Amino acid sequence: MERDDIIEYSLDAHHSEEEGRKIRRKIWLVTLFLAVVTTVEVTLGAYWKEWFEPSAWNMIKWTYVVLTLVKATYIVMTFMHLGDERRNIRAIILLPYALFILYLVFIAIWESQYVNYLWENYL
């Protein structure tokens, strides 16, 4: 007995070779962009003591936060196809998450400064 609820989607791909090249090019560009941003993050983390003075640590932390948010947004826009949606839909989906992430970052940095204050003054 043959099932009629299984659909073979690969047979339904009606695009030309040129469109396929565009898709593959986009995939390679996304991979390259994410690799470059990750390399910058790792290099910055590995060599920040040699390249920057200790007072630049706050700038480096904010750079990590911004680069991580850029990567997360790019991944959501590309791989979850949110970039293909209308602007209002993107805003409705991303704005609450962005505000929540900024709130978490604010709390983490605020509390880390307090812990640092306690560490320097009482220990």
Image: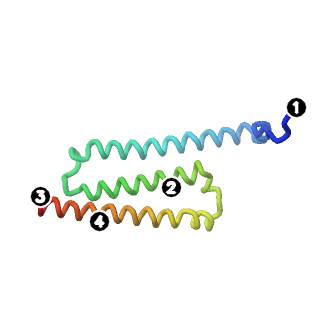
The numbered disc on residue 123 is 3
First of labels 2, 4 by sequence position? 2
Q: CA distance from mark 1 to mark 3?
A: 76 Å
On the rendered structure, is 21 left or right of 121?
Answer: right
Residue at 61% over, 65% down:
87
On the rendered structure, is 6 left or right of 81?
Answer: right
> Of the residues shown, which amino acid type is indicated by label 3?
Leu
Q: Nearer the viewer, residue 60 or 26?
A: 60
Q: CA distance from mark 2 to mark 4?
A: 24 Å
Front disc: 1 or 3: 1
> Of the residues shown, which amino acid type is indicated by label 4?
Trp
Residue at 13% over, 60% down:
120
Front disc: 2 or 4: 4
Front disc: 4 or 3: 3
Front disc: 3 or 2: 3
* Residue position marked by numbered label 2 in the rendering: 73
Percent across and percent down for residue 70 are 46, 54
Q: Count of labels shown? A: 4
Q: Residues within 10 Å of mark 3 (few under 14, many from 20)?
A: few
Q: Is residue 107 above or below residue 17?
A: below
Instruction: Answer whether labels 4 and 3 touch (C-beta < 8 Å).
Output: no
Q: Residues within 10 Å of mark 1 (few under 14, many from 20)?
A: few
Q: Residues within 10 Å of mark 2 (few under 14, many from 20)?
A: some
